[in-house]
């Protein structure tokens, strides 16, 4: 029996983009090409498929999940905010950040995870605040927990680039996302743009990322000539539109680029357009400083601090009002008694109404959370069934049988494969834990092409 040992590296860096994941370790830099629609604007849409791709990559490259993983992601849904602050201790600083967010942004803070960094100036702090939607962050956390990665750090890509790169402009140029970061006396302004024009083009002509890279660089690609012509025409328009965004938003000075749209031809075009500037297309992510306070996987007690802070503000204001009110009461005589009684009655009435409305709101929230819990449990079970089935399929893949594709629709997993033995296919159907049907089977050149349907959760 052969036993395969995975190699333990010090840390693995994964740069997640909508159509590819760059994997960097001590030995090499690799890529996982992501089919379209699995990740859209930084949000994971198909965790099961992504789980499969990452698991196979780690196994093939002998990467242990016991390593420390740094996950860098980007999304136009992330909100950035810059503020100035007097020199404060960490507790007061966190409270001030929460207060500034509440004052400046019309959002529900409970739907975001918040991190910030601070740059000390003479008598103040310059603070960059980043708010990542929980819908984006939770997808990555759930994915890597399912992969059994127990040392995982999650970073918003732009926050790390801001911390490390001494360039006047930092540009993340992607097929869907464009991030432009401009520096001004240590303060960075982040502009995020999202455009699904290329994704729509991919879906329209059934093109994947690797096809698009070859077509843009005029390399051979086995695609219908009519589709090539239409894609090339439209893609040139989209790329020029992105150059227009760059020209509008770049400040004077040096520029460093990253992103999955940096093909050879695109880099040549940029070099000609910005020939008078200092340019770079290379970032060594292993040398960057990953500050722990920017790790979105780190457990914080920000919300608790927020509540204490707002409670103290409210208490101070309330005390001031009470003393003011008492001062007025002491200066008045018997004639004001009826007015005070009437005011008291009004206040009690308003409090009663407020409590009733709050109870209704809390009840609705509870119902919603229970429904969300049911949905989460369903997703957890589906992921568990998928992983069990995937592990069985892996053990059954040998020289007589090969799996070529799969798709997941609701509770059904469809698996395509090839085999040179009908008995091997029949044994596979019988061996699977969940109810399995052979829905397609045809023979070409002595090879059986088959498709099976597996009902996840329904015992065979």
Image (tube, rainbow, N blue to C red):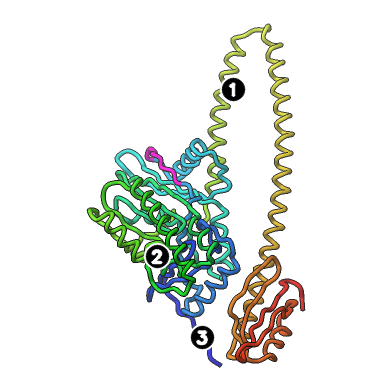
**Res 68 visible:** no
- The residue depicted at 70 percent of the width and 37 percent of the height is 358
Q: How far apart are the two marked residues, 3 and 2, measured between alpha carbons?
A: 40 Å
The residue labelled by disc 3 is 4
Q: Are marks 1 and 3 in contact (CB under 8 Å)?
A: no
**Magenta residue check for 83:** yes
**Disc 3: CA contacts within 10 A as few (<14), some (14-19) or many (>=20):** few
Considering only order in the chain, which callout, 3 or 1, is on the residue closer to the N terminus?
3
- Name the residue nearer the viewer: 175 or 80: 175
Callout 1: SS? helix
Q: How far apart are the two marked residues, 2 and 1, measured between alpha carbons?
A: 70 Å
Side of 190 where 392 appears, left or right: right
Considering only order in the chain, which callout, 1 or 2, is on the residue closer to the N terminus?
2
Q: How far apart are the two marked residues, 1 and 3, measured between alpha carbons?
A: 73 Å
Callout 3: SS? loop
- The residue depicted at 37 percent of the width and 60 percent of the height is 258
**Res 353 visible:** yes
Residue 41 location (% of width, % of height): 51, 56
Q: Is residue 1 above or below residue 99?
A: below
Residue 413 location (% of width, % of height): 67, 72
Which stretch did the figure color magenta? 80-87
The residue labelled by disc 2 is 216
| Tag in front: 2 or 1 | 2
Determine which quarter of the picture holds residue 335: top right
Side of 283 where 441 appears, left or right: right
- The residue depicted at 70 percent of the width and 49 percent of the height is 368
Q: Is residue 226 above or below residue 239?
A: below
* Predominant SS of the magenta segment: strand
**Disc 2: CA contacts within 10 A as few (<14), some (14-19) or many (>=20):** many
- Quadrant housing the C terminus: bottom right
The residue labelled by disc 1 is 322
């Amino acid at each position: 029996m052969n036993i395969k040992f995975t190699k333990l590296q010090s840390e693995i860096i994964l740069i997640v983009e909508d159509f590819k994941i760059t994997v960097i370790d001590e030995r090499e830099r690799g890529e996982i090409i992501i089919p379209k629609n699995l990740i859209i604007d930084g949000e994971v849409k198909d965790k099961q498929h992504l789980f499969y791709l990452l698991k196979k990559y780690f196994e093939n490259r002998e990467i242990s999940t016991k390593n420390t993983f740094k996950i860098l992601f980007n999304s136009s849904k992330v909100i950035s905010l810059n503020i100035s602050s007097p020199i404060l201790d960490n507790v007061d600083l966190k409270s001030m950040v929460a207060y500034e967010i509440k004052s400046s942004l019309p959002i529900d803070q409970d739907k975001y995870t918040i991190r910030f960094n601070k740059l000390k100036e003479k008598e103040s702090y310059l603070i960059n605040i980043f708010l990542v939607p929980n819908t984006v962050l939770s997808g990555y956390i759930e994915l890597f927990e399912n992969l059994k990665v127990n040392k995982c750090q999650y970073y918003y890509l732009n926050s790390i680039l801001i911390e490390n790169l001494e360039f006047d402009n930092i540009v993340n140029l992607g097929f869907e996302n464009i991030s432009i970061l401009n520096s001004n006396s240590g303060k960075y302004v982040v502009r995020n743009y999202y455009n699904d024009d290329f994704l729509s083009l991919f879906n329209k002509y059934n093109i994947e990322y690797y096809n698009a890279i070859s077509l843009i660089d005029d390399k051979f690609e086995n695609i219908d000539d009519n589709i090539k012509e239409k894609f090339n025409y439209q893609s040139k328009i989209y790329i020029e539109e992105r150059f227009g965004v760059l020209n509008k938003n770049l400040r004077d000075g040096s520029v460093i680029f990253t992103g999955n749209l940096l093909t050879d031809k695109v880099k040549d075009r940029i070099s000609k357009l910005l020939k008078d500037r200092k340019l770079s297309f290379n970032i060594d992510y292993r040398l960057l400083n990953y500050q722990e306070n920017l790790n979105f996987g780190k457990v914080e007690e920000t919300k608790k601090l927020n509540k204490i802070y707002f409670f103290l503000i409210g208490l101070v204001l309330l005390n001031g009002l009470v003393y003011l009110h008492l001062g007025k009461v002491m200066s008045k005589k018997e004639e004001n008694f009826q007015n005070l009684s009437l005011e008291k009655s009004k206040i009690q009435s308003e409090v009663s109404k407020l409590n009733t409305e709050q109870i209704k709101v809390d009840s609705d929230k509870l119902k919603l959370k229970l429904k969300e819990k049911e949905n989460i449990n369903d997703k957890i079970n589906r992921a568990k069934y998928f992983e069990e089935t995937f592990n069985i399929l892996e053990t059954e893949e040998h020289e007589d049988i090969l799996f070529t594709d799969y798709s997941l629709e609701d509770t059904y997993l469809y698996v395509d494969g090839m085999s040179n033995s009908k008995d091997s296919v029949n044994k596979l159907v019988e061996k699977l834990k969940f109810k399995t049907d052979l829905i397609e089977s045809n023979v070409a050149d002595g090879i059986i092409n088959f498709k099976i349907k597996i009902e996840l959760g329904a015992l065979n």
